[in-house]
Amino acid sequence: MKKHSLRMKMAYRLGAAALALSLGFTSYAVPDQSDVDDIQNEIDKTQDEIDKTQSEIDATKDKKDRLQQAKSEMEDYLKKLNQQYSSLESQISELNKQIENKKAEIEQAKGELEAAKATEEKQYADMKARIQYMYENPQSSFIEILLESGDFAGALNRADYAARISAYDRDMLEAYAAHKAEIQEQEEKLEAEKEALDEMQASVEKKQSEVSALASSTSGKISQHVSDIAAAQADLDGKSNTLAGQQEVLKQLIAEKKKIEAQIEASKAAEIIGSLGDVTGVRTTDLEYTQYGAYSASDDEVKALATLIYCEAGNQGAEGQLAVGAVVMNRIRDPRFSQGDIMSVIRASGQFSPVTSGRFDLMLTDGADSVTESCYNAARRAIAGESNVGNRTFFRTYANYPSLSGLVIGAHIFSYTWNYSS
């Protein structure tokens, strides 16, 4: 609100001043240096705000870049987790097949074990029946077998047959028992293998569950980063719009300052022209000696002024050289000019061609030995307050502008105003 009020006040004063001047009211109050200072303060504040906003934009960009980098890294991590989950899924599927096969083998072993047990029990029952029969129908001696057989060979055959049956029963019973033990051992081995597969499956499933939880957590973080990136971009857009607005305000303030300075300059020029009287068309070579107060100059300032005099009037004699130095010092004393020291006058934009071309700086740094003592003398005289051009503040090359009015000294024509009305 304060800035807006200041700009409105400046615009009003400029417009009123322009109207007053157009109507001939030269005494109308025009903007002064305080108005320039006020708007310069606003320019400085606005520039500070621009710098602050730009710093915030840079910080927001860095934040967004870091979020995008983190999001990219998490997406890569999630991809690896998904691949790991898929691999574990394949392992679980393969373990399920092995477990099912192992179950089938166990069932088969159990069936074989049951069959072996049944065979063993049948063999045991048969052997038991035969033993019981032999017990219930004992043969008291080989003599009785011999008598029943009728001959010796028959008796031997009957005795041998009985012995063979008994041996066979024992062998078969032992064989079936061994087979049953083998099958039972195989079943126990299969059960142990199945138990190991079950444990492995449980471990893989646990790992898969952990991977799934990590993937879910990572997906959540990625979603949060996406949201944070969008928020950072929105913040960046807002700050960019703010910056554009601040830059536009700065542009307007600078333009207003230039208008005010131009108005002040025009007012001062009008005041000076009015105080000079009618000098239109006057051209003179009569020197106008004036003695002003001395200026306290440093060695560097003396050197700079002497160098400028050398560049502008090194070949024009003592009076021409003093005249150039006097113009520089007159500008320090003239309220129309804002420069308050020698270097500021010399480096004022677009005022001295050797400065604009770069010759002045070249001589100041590399050609100082070429500057003549007469130029140093002229510089010291001007700094001491001596002037042979009165309070004139402008000069040009006379040969280039033969129709101008002013004081001609050497190759230059000097004037009170930039338009050379005198």
Image (cartoon, grey):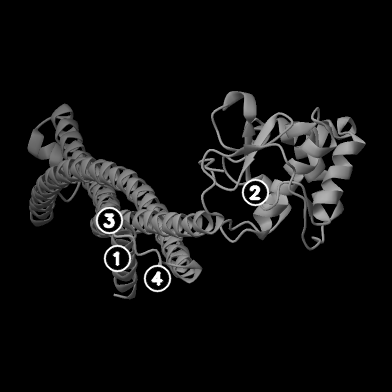
Q: Earlier in the sequence, mark 2 or mark 3?
A: 3
Q: Residue at x 16, y 44 (%)?
A: 109
Left or right of residue 377, residue 13 in this image = left
Q: Where does label 4 land, which residue?
A: 29
Dot 2 amino acid type: Arg
Q: Quadrant of the N terminus?
A: bottom left
Looking at the image, can residue 166 be seen? Answer: no
User: Element under label 2?
Assistant: loop
Q: Relative to the observer, which residue lies in front, 35 or 377?
A: 377
Mark 4 and mark 2: Cα distance apart in space: 26 Å
Numbered disc in front, either 2 or 3: 2
Mark positioned earlier in the residue sequence (1 or 3): 1
State if disc 4 and disc 1 touch (CB < 8 Å): no
Q: Nearer the viewer, mark 2 or mark 1?
A: 2
Query: As drawn, is 181 to the left or to the right of 307?
Result: left
What is the secondary structure assignment of the residue under circle 1? helix
Type of amino acid at the residue the image marks with label 4:
Ala
Q: SS of the residue at dot 4?
A: loop
**Position of the C terminus by quadrant:** top right
Q: Residue under circle 2?
A: 392
Is residue 203 shown left or right of residue 49?
left
Q: Earlier in the sequence, mark 1 or mark 4?
A: 1
Q: Few, some or many C-alpha atoms within 10 Å of disc 2 (few <14, some 14-19, many ≥20)?
A: many
Residue annotated with mark 1: 16
Q: Which residue is mark 3?
A: 241
Q: Residues within 10 Å of mark 1 (few under 14, many from 20)?
A: some
In the image, residue 70 lies at what x, y percent?
37, 51
How far, Cα to Cα, is label 2 from label 1?
Answer: 31 Å
Q: Nearer the viewer, mark 1 or mark 3?
A: 1
